[in-house]
Amino acid sequence: MKLIQLTVNGRRYDVPVDDDELLLDVLRDKIGAYSVREGCGVGACGACTVLVGGTSVSSCLARAVRYDGAELTTADGLPEDDAVVTAFVESRAMQCGYCIPGFVLMAHELLAENPQPDREQIVAHLEGNICRCGTYQEICRAVEVAAERRARA
Amino acid sequence: MTQTTPEPGVDTGVGSRRSRVGAAGKVLGQLRHVADRPHGGCAHVAVHRSTRPHARITSIDVSEAAALDGVEGVVTGADLYKVLGDRMFTGPAFSDQPPLAVDRVRYVGEPVVAVLARDVATAREAAELVYVEYEDLEPIYDVADALAERAFVHDALRPSVVFGDLRHLSGKTETNIAYQYNLKLGDPESAATQGTSVGFEFWAPPVHHVPIELPATIGWVEADRLELYSTTQTPSYVRQSVADMLGLPLSHVRIRVAPLGGSFGSKMYDRLEPLIAALAWLHRREVRMVASREEAFLLTTRHGAGVISSMSADADGNLTSAIADVRYDTGAYADVGPRITAKSGMIAAGPYKIPNVAIRSRCIYTNKPSAGPFRGFGVPQVTWSHETLIDELARARGEDPAGFRRRNLLREGDESYMGTVMHSADFVGCLDAVTEAIGWDKPLDRGSGRWRRGRGVAVGIKAVLTPTVANAVLQLNQDGSATLMISTVDMGQGSDTIMPQIVAEVLSMDAERIRVVAVDTDVTPYDTITAGSRSTYHTGNAVRGVAERMRERLVDLAAKRAGGSSRDLKLTADGVLNTASGEVYRISELIHEHFGARGATLTEEFNYTTSWQPYDKETGRSAKATEHWFAGAVAVQLLVDRWTGRVRVEHLVVAGDVGRAINPTLVEQQLAGSAIMGLGHALFDELVFDQGQMLNSTLLDYQLPSVKDLPGKLTPIIIESPHATGPFGAKGVGETGIIPIAPAVANAVRDAVGVRITRLPLSPERVLQAMDEAGVEK
Amino acid sequence: MKPPLHQPTSLAEACELLDTLEETMVYGGGTAIQILIKQGVLFAGNLVDLSRVPGLAEIEETAEGLRVGPMTTLRRMETSEVVRRRVPLAAQTYGHVANPRVRNTASVGGNIAHGDYRLDPPTALLVLGARVELTSVRGTRTVPIRDFFVDFQVTAVEPGELITALHIPAAPAGNSSTFVKMSSLGENDWPAASVAAQVDAERRTLRLGLGALAHVPRYVEVPLDGGGVDAAVAAATAAVEPELDPIPDVRGSADYKRKLGLVATEDAVRRAWEEAR
């Protein structure tokens, strides 16, 4: 066990972890960030997405011990008036909603890099996230709405 | 707050596009799911799985596993059998499935030994340390092997007590056919000798649901009661199944469910629940199992199905005959396969007027993971057959495939070949809507060189699950808010959003003030299942009924207060209005006065049950095989890359008759979402087996449609042909969209490059090979 | 058993660990290794994690092109201004691996050390004539990428060695290049065939890198004798055809992948040619 420090959504946590413990499990079981979810375990579905210093990471493939000192964002830590969150809600971009937190964080990363993405760029950035309910049209629209909203703000 | 709260006066009743309940919580990931239950101190379960498709277990050595630090217990099928006996075999149609294999394994990946340990890693490590010796039996890899009857998956058939019509199969030996359904009308063989006929052999492979939420079950014992917290669409079923297995009264088994992260049929009947219930009960311990993705693939699949079929028309272009031999590969355990076999078999000739029909539909055991329900309940597999046949028959006659279908489609009041009359199933309306939206009658630029363009259409029919039982309990709180208790599980289809709309419509209230209680069999009333697109109609009717009772109750209270009759009294948004005097009795006052207490509740309950008439033993026909039908249609325009065989869908239009859309946005999302899922089945989804071993059970190898696989344009269309007894004319929509997708795509490929493909999926290799075989010029 | 994770803080320490420990495996971004662990097919006694070794994630501009540290993420290769400017083919190709999230974690060194025949970046690196710098307690040596992929999931990395840099020469002025990836199932799937192509300014030589079309990534150099694009396509497909030896799997038969490889070759050559105009 090693003691590592994680800052999750602005709050500091000192957590003991095993070498092989996944960031996914640490966030869920030790910090209670249940918006981070295992869907495939191989980085292919995006349900376990977190942002590390603003960069998206599949927490199911990440060993927690390598993230000592990192600043993490999980979807449950976003404010309700966040432009991406409100855009998803208003665009009706969810059915069961299980995968949506991952899409929200991918959208955040994209808009930070590219504030006015076109549809093709949105699709390219979201290609590694699976919405099995098939809500992709609404999700793409939500990202466009969020971009417009951030541009106006 | 981003949660949309409608302005006063904004309608949230039937027909409104109110926002999905808990939308912001879903987006933020705050909605809790089953696996989110904290698990400090519980035992984690892992299972050792069979490496053989079909073998006798000769010995099991668990000593190394049991000795591993952190292991609390190791349990074999024989251990369970000692305690539970034959009760350990469960299943919705046949009681053939053990939670752990006893004496014999029947598929690669079947659970053989369960390990309980302090954490998941230890449990999985210990499971690897179990050593099982087998004596191989002849494996049955597919339906052809099974029908050769050289070996048998089960020594004797074991129908469950649930379905009376399966009783005669009990104890039947030397067969791999779990169930057979036959339909016979007229003389199809002779009819087929006249006019034009087409016939093919079809195959739709097994596929997987892959909801992104993994199946999870947690069980514990409180005093003498067993509690399960589980990802299931069928809490009432699971309660019965587990109570039967453990010999407990229903009152001593409690099933709780959180909203599901998708399911599509995968999380129903007996999945992880029997094993976890048995382990929790025997070990008096909180035990927990969250399936890995690889394990989830093994829990259930969609039936692979072969259909050998033909269809004939006379010189006037009227259908005269249809023949279909349907074979569902149900894997090692029947699950609900026998039901699928009949329900889908009975409409295997499509939604058409056909005077002569013969159908044989069989549910066949093989040594593969058990196949069970999947969005569409076996119907997409037979639709693949009839919508290909009718398309080819139209072409053989030189007719437009849409016009040919239109002439032969069943209409309101028609008795179908399987004996039931059509109502609220607007096939023609659906077909017309999709052909118009795709521009069917407009000239098509067919492309040149490498890329060729084509259009295709297909129609779908499916019966709603019948008979079923629904109950609703409504509590109207003194402050005018309400709590609705139903056992419908919201898994993304939106029942928690639309059921309050029905109540709101009846009681003239704001749906935002109505809360649906999460399913808890201690609290929420019996409901057959959340599946088969049945809930909007069945549970919706129970909800409408209970709301109407509540309305009468309020009017009665107002009448009592007014000291007279209920004449002239009417419930409005403001309260009960005396239309004669203009006086208004507010609900909060009525309830307060009635009980003399703040915060009191008025409670009402309502039951809605449908009935059916079993199939005639000789003909397979029934005057009421189902409460009602779902009608849908799909039109597709696509491009085919003649060099690679790759298909690119430019426009997909999907229409479904929902009777009445309670919430049109949610209906459109169900239509579009099922179309996208169906597109995966059409183009690339497929579980690949080699000698019984599943080869692609990870999301690196099993393909699901991503945002990159979307059609260029996707248009969902709602058709409303009101159902006479539906709640406000409504019925379900969860499956309608998926049913005709694959044949519509294949028909468009046929249109584009002239090849007819009868095996799914239409992978580029298959398309290219078909073009090569047909000598299509590149 | 779980292999322990060692976290050296200097290159010397990393080399020392690789030299002294049994059955070592270098842990870079970890994306591939974690998947192998999950699937129970990772055979390593000790993992040596490079994430705490300073200086391994730099991209330096050199006279000939770029020197890229092994811990540089694939996503930086895709988005970095200097990579886009000096070796646009590399930036384009790195941008096709898996998905953006995996590219954020997966490393340049791990990507080639993995030696998977289907990976995209080797196709571009083969075309560009990259060199792999390998370091161990014995010193440093450089292996041309065209000699790096030895056999199915076998590379030129010797026991005790780790990749310490990738040297990528910038293509000479006037050349043009592209990368074509063809999947047979979902659009986002692994490739069933991929081809990187580069044509030089004088149109004398076509350089092709093939992915997923044999048990190792393959390099093919095609001399041109001054014809037009059709002649170049004919020469390219003729040169590529004997190199095709694909592995059949759920994505297609060997025969189909061979056909797809030829179409990908043609597409890549035509697109590169177009860009050159």
Image (tube, coloured by chain):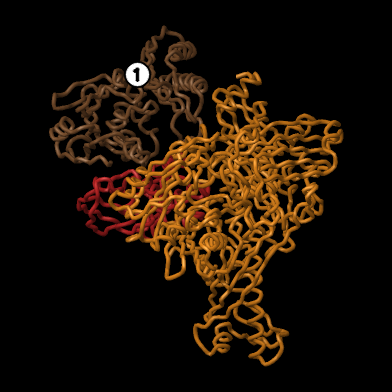
Q: Colour of chain B?
A: orange
Q: Quadrant of the N terminus of chain C?
A: top left
Query: Residue flagged by tag 1: what amino acid is it?
Result: Gly
Left or right for B429, reference A29: right
Q: Is residue A42 above or below residue B484?
A: above
Tell which of A138 and A49 is nearer to you: A49
Could one spot residue A56 in this view of the protein?
no
Figure chain in red: A
Left or right for B375, reference C105: right
Q: Quadrant of the C terminus of chain C?
A: top left
Q: Position of residue B387 (x, y in %)?
A: 70, 38
Tell which of C242 and B463 is nearer to you: B463
Determine the residue located farthest toward the bottom in the rendered image. Answer: B563
Q: Position of residue A96 (x, y in %)?
A: 50, 55
Badge 1 crowding class, 10 Å Cα cut-off, few under 14, some 14 to 19, many 20 or more, is few
- State which quadrant residue C5 falls in: top left
Q: Colour of chain C?
A: brown
The secondary element bearing badge 1 is classed as loop
Tell which of B105 and B280 is nearer to you: B105
Residue corresponding to mark 1: C174
The mark total stands at: 1
- State which quadrant residue B303 falls in: top right
Q: Position of residue B352 (x, y in %)?
A: 77, 44
Q: Residue at x 86, y 31 (%)?
A: B194
